[in-house]
Image (tube, rainbow, N blue to C red):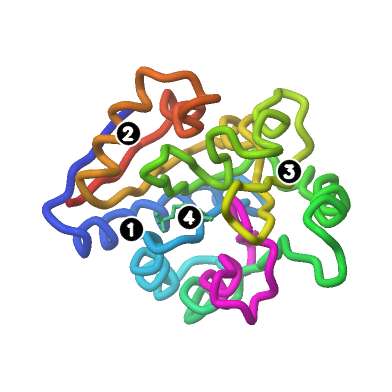
Amino acid sequence: MNLIEYPDREILAMKVANRLAGELKKCLMTHEFASFAVPGGTTPGPIFDMLSGTALEWERVHVMLTDERWVSERDERSNGALVRDRLMTGHAAAARFIPFFQPGMDAETGAAALAPTLDPELPLSLLVLGMGEDMHTASLFPGAEGVEAAMAGNAPNLCPVHVEGQEIARVTLPAHVLRGAMSTHVVIFGDAKRAALERAEGLPPEEAPIAAVLNSAEVHWAA
Ligand SMILES: O=C1O[C@H](COP(=O)(O)O)[C@@H](O)[C@H](O)[C@H]1O
């Protein structure tokens, strides 16, 4: 794991956005398109704000989430709504967004229908992940229903997950898709997540799902 510390969250957002833009441009020099997976949650908004204002060939970028809460984009809990509002705007509005939520289907049926359509997007060109204090990443929550299947090497490209105590289902990219990305960045804020990350380094991915990607990831942290 390569951990980079920043003096504050704003500088982190600026530097990471620059870095991601540079990697997308480089990828587009040698590939027809770049597949770019991004997290939801509270952390990536400022990075999206800065990245969306960067000029690059966004029409050749395919954006998808690392995971989605199974709600429509009109629901404030939707990760897709965050991406549409904060990333798919400005220059980045030209990118193609691959939404995961399928109206009229449950998470199981929707994930099974979408999984094969992600084949042409793999391996991911560029992956950004968040992490919770419980060491979950994407929607790979320790001990949640569906996570064991999503950690398997032969898991479909999109897996349903049910987290105890959460009323809505989720879908997530499985561990092997995350691990297969050409470039991986994890973005975390605060002392509690830093401590969780350090704990995760010594744990198996079943207990600390973020551990599944740490070998190949650059981790960006600010207090
Ligand atoms: O539920 C989720 O949590 C993680 C971390 O979110 P944050 O609010 O602590 O930044 C996020 O990466 C994931 O995409 C999201 O669905």
Q: Is residue 19 above or below residue 148?
A: below
Counting residues from the N terminus, which is met first, the one under dot 1 or under dot 3?
1
On residue 211, the disc is none
Disc 1 to disc 2, C-alpha distance: 24 Å
- Residue 159: mark in rendering: 3
Q: Which residue is mark 2?
A: 197
- Of labels 1 and 2, earlier in sequence is 1
Crowd around label 2: few <14 · some 14–19 · many ≥20 (10 Å): many
Q: Is residue 68 magenta?
A: yes
What amino acid type is highlighted by mark number 3? Cys
**Of the image marks 3 and 2, the number of the one nearer the N terminus:** 3
Disc number lying in front (4 or 3): 3
Q: Nearer the viewer, mark 1 or mark 2?
A: 2
Going by the numbered disc 4, the residue's amino acid type is Lys
The amino acid type, in three-letter code, at marker 2 is Leu
Q: Residue at x 66, y 37 (%)?
A: 174
- Report which residue position mark 1 lands on: 18
Q: Is 12 covered by the magenta stretch?
A: no
Q: Is residue 154 visible?
A: yes
Tell me the distance, in whole angstroms, between the alpha carbons under discs 4 and 3. 30 Å
Nearer mark to the viewer, of 4 and 1: 1
- Circles 3 and 2, Cβ within 8 Å, touching? The answer is no
In what element is the residue under mark 4?
helix
Q: Position of residue 141 (x, y in %)?
A: 54, 40
Magenta extent = 59-84
